Amino acid sequence: MKAQLLLILHFLPVLLFAQQEVRFPDDFKTSALDGKEVTITNTLTLTNNYYAYLSSKSVTLSDGLLWTPTEKNLPGADMFEEENAKNAANQLILMPGDYSYIDKDGTCRIGQTITNLTGTLSYNKSNKKYTLTPTQKPELTENERPTHVDLQEGTYNVKVASFNILNYNDHGEVQRIKTTAALKALDADIYALAEIKNNALQGLCQSLNEAFSTERYAYVENRNGTGIVCAFIYNSEKVKPYKDLQLNSYAIWNNKPSLTERKVAQAFSLKSNNERFIICLNHWKAKDSNGDSGDGQSGSVERRKIEAEATLRFIEEMKEYYNDPDVLIVGDLNSYSKEDPIRLLEDGGFINQLQRYSPQGYSYAYNSNGSYAVGYLDHSLANPSMHGQIVDAQPFHINADEPRALNIEKGTPQPDNMYGCSDHNPIVTALLLVSTGIENASASRPSIRLTGDPRSGYLTLTTSSELTLTRVEIVNVSGQVIASYSADSTVSTDNRFILPVKGMARGFYLIRAYDAQGGCSNCKVVLP
């Protein structure tokens, strides 16, 4: 008995002072943990780092990222209130205490994670949030600063980078250095730029050439004044503009066209094979308090809906002007992915490439309604004929993840790197344009070939011998399937289809070929 008592007394300090293992936020719904030392067993994500460059300031941790409600949910007042409440309950404030969470680069970034966080908790009755002061050094990992865009080489031949560059030319020499560094790291064939002063475009292009020690970059000037515009810089060795840049005047607000210089289109041709496509670059009306209905879309959503409808109308005209059906919409649309303006584009036949390739990424972080949440304000959408030629779309996480106080707009930037050169992450879209029009992102997928004279009323679709075709569709530029043939409904063999085209209207069409292995290959054809 005495031995047992001695054993209990020996371990009593450990039992009394052991750290309590808890999960966040499941175990944090009351004030019961106030004053306790705990170890949080689940992995937490850094979600608010606004002042994180100051070693004495706090950051906010959550169980996973906090999403802007309308990034993942359809707009609605009830939804908005519920999602904001969830976000508010999923926030733990981390004070540095005796430790620093700033890394060797002088930052910590949204999306970084901490495991086995240990510290003492205090409960704030007014906001019902906990603050943790660490008793062991917290280690932030993952989501380190990227140095280049991670694309698989050999899968694309045109790289488009769309980028809101934060009122370029308003923030001096540091902005020029940082923005040029970002453009160099993007290493794009076409830069689709929003928020650049027209009179600064030539200087930025020259700065990019100097960074690459070349003269290959040129620009397409937006001729509509000297204010804030959308414009293009491009690699003249890879692509060339086709015809002139066009301005969209269909968005009418207060009985006059609204900011046409921020809604433009330009066609480019790939020099190696003359394949052409159209970029429709936009910067839509910003979110504000004007007309905010409380459904999560913020103010001026009606104006952005008008801009979306005007974009669809404008694109139909641009397909005729540039004589090509392939359209890519990019830019800062000031609308999250589930909001009405984006759904209008999708209802108009455009396919969201970021939801296709990077659904867990984001381009913007904003402190609103008690949460610092993320989502896509910047987009990449393609119509059906363009969709089959896109092989990747992703954000380049160099800005939105950084402490906002390091942003050039806040006056405390790090001058010798690209990080924080804007408040938006650039969006990169990778295209595979080939002279046959075949989308062939996978090197293992056998190619298809379209031959014949359309004036004869027939075309022949052939494949390599190891591929068995089961169905072929003919799709018009609006994405409508106007003809469909199965293997037993037309003259065909396993790898050869005869396609009747007699009586079809002149213009561009997409041919979709489905094989027995579950693959789908596309090619384009022009009927005279």
Image: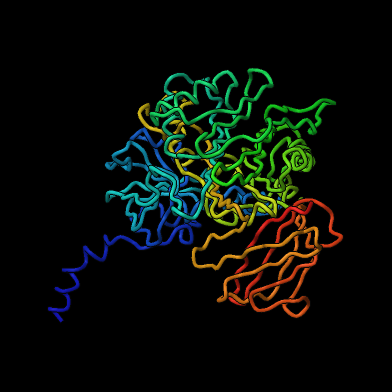
Q: Nearer the viewer, residue 390 or 62?
A: 390
Above or below, 39 against 110 in this view is: below
Quick check: 318 above or below 500? Answer: above
Residue name at image x 52 percent, y 34 percent = 236
Q: Residue at x 56, y 50 (%)?
A: 431
* 32 over 499 or under it: above or below: above
Asked which quadrant contains residue 489, the reply is bottom right
Residue 394 in the image, given as x and y percentages of width and height: 52, 49
How far across and how far down the image is residue 525, in percent?
71, 56
Q: Is residue 53 left or right of residue 471?
A: left
144 lies left or right of 388? left
Q: Position of residue 149 (x, y in %)?
A: 44, 46
The number of numbered badges drawn on the structure is: 0
User: Can residue 287 be seen from the camera position used here?
Assistant: no
**Of the pair 324 and 387, the residue shown nearer to us:** 324
Quadrant showing the N terminus: bottom left
Relative to 121, is 333 on the left or the right? right
Colour setup of the view: rainbow
Pick the residue in front: 292 or 232: 232
Q: Quadrant of residue 194?
A: top right
Residue 262, visible in the rendered structure: yes
Provide residue 34's location: percent of width, then percent of height: 41, 52
